[in-house]
């Protein structure tokens, strides 16, 4: 039998040759999958960048819109009150809204607690204990 025949006939190959072939195929498969994942992530990253840029632009335009809305409120109040009182009133309302938002945000952040993913850490610790116990049972 020739080496070529051994490569094409799996039944004639030795265990070592089969293991080497499998290792080579697995290595190629992993390399190909990583290349595919890299291409996919690159494409998704580009889309995410464009989407994030558009959302950032929308946020800036929304910010300007809020400024114009507040200006409109001042102009409308100026029709009935002196300008200084209209500006003062709108300013107080804006600061009150900012204060309420800050308090609500602080309350929500306090509910979060520790940034460490405690459930995941507990699961990993349990897994480690299980593997150690299995390893100790295997040695005895």
Image (tube, rainbow, N blue to C red):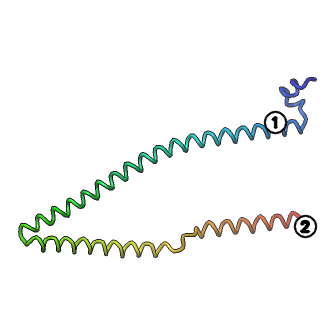
State which mark lies toward you, 2 or 1: 1
Q: Which residue is mark 2?
A: 140
Q: Quadrant of the N terminus?
A: top right
Q: Looking at the picture, tell me which residue is in the foreground, 88 or 7.
A: 88
CA separation in Å, label 2 and label 1: 35 Å
Q: Residues within 10 Å of mark 2 (few under 14, many from 20)?
A: few
Taking the view exactly as shown, the residue that stands out farthest to the right is: 1
In percent of width and height, residue 28 lies at 72, 37
Which image quadrant for residue 65? Answer: bottom left
In percent of width and height, residue 115 lies at 54, 70
Q: Which residue is mark 1?
A: 21
Mark 2 and mark 1 lie on one chain; the one further toward the N terminus is 1
Q: Horizontally, is 74 left or right of 12 in the view?
A: left
Which image quadrant for residue 15? Answer: top right
Q: Horizontally, is 102 left or right of 37 in the view?
A: left
Q: Residues within 10 Å of mark 1 (few under 14, many from 20)?
A: few
């Amino acid at each position: 039998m020739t080496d070529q025949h051994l490569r094409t006939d799996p039944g004639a190959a030795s265990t070592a040759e089969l293991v080497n072939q499998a290792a080579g195929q697995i290595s190629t498969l992993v390399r190909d999958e990583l290349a595919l994942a890299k291409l996919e992530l690159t494409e998704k990253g580009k889309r995410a960048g464009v989407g994030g840029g558009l959302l950032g632009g929308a946020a800036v335009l929304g910010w300007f819109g809020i400024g114009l809305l507040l200006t409109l409120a001042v102009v409308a109040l100026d029709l009935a009150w002196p300008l200084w009182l209209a500006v003062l009133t709108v300013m107080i309302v804006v600061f009150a809204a900012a204060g309420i938002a800050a308090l609500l945000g602080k309350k929500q952040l306090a509910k979060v607690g520790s940034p460490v993913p405690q459930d995941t850490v507990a699961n990993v610790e349990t897994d480690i204990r299980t593997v150690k116990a299995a390893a100790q049972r295997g040695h005895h």
